[in-house]
Image (cartoon, grey):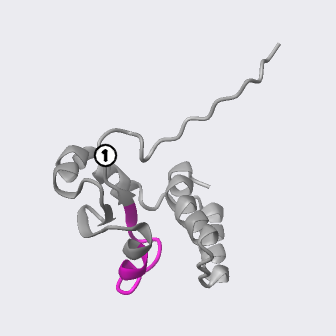
Amino acid sequence: MNSIISLLLLPLLNHFEKTKIYLKSTKIEKFLLYLQRNHIHMLDKEFQYYLDHQDELVKEYNGKFIVIKGESVIGSYDTEIQAYTETIKEHELGTFLIQFCSPGKGDYSQSFHSRVVFA
């Protein structure tokens, strides 16, 4: 699966699981399988838009979850769940990006450390 898609969708799905909010899981599973099988690079344009305009977006939406479709912000919300539930009312799942808006790379990057030594 495309790593950007994994980083963007899995935290949202994990949040639903942790809060015991159940969606039609078969629909989500089918969608994720479709992405994985077809190596779809959906949302790359939206994520690149966020990266290219992060400074100006932070000035307007700092601390909010913004929804990006194409190259425009179509909504801003206080919570990730609110952003998701409101946006899917009018837009198909997989056609928009939900991104927490903040300065720096901290909200879209992860670092993994290991104490494994290769001899």
The verdict on residue 89 being magenta is: yes
Residue that appears at 47% across and 42% down: 109
Q: Name the image quarter holding the C terminus.
A: top right
Task: Tell me the kind of residue under disc 1.
Answer: Leu
- Give left or right: position of 2 versus 69: right
* Highlighted range, magenta: 84-98
Q: Which residue is mark 1?
A: 51
Residue that appears at 36% across and 78% down: 87
Residue 104 percent across, percent down from the top left? 33, 38
| Vertical comparison of 103 with 89: above or below | above
Residue at the far top: name it: 119
Q: Name the image quarter holding the N terminus.
A: bottom right
Report the number of numbered marks.
Answer: 1
Helix or strand or loop: what does disc 1 sit on?
helix
| Vertical comparison of 67 with 21: above or below | above
- Give left or right: position of 24 versus 84: right
Residue that appears at 39% across and 64% down: 97
Residue 52 percent across, percent down from the top left? 26, 45
- Give left or right: position of 90 versus 3: left
Residue that appears at 65% across and 76% down: 30
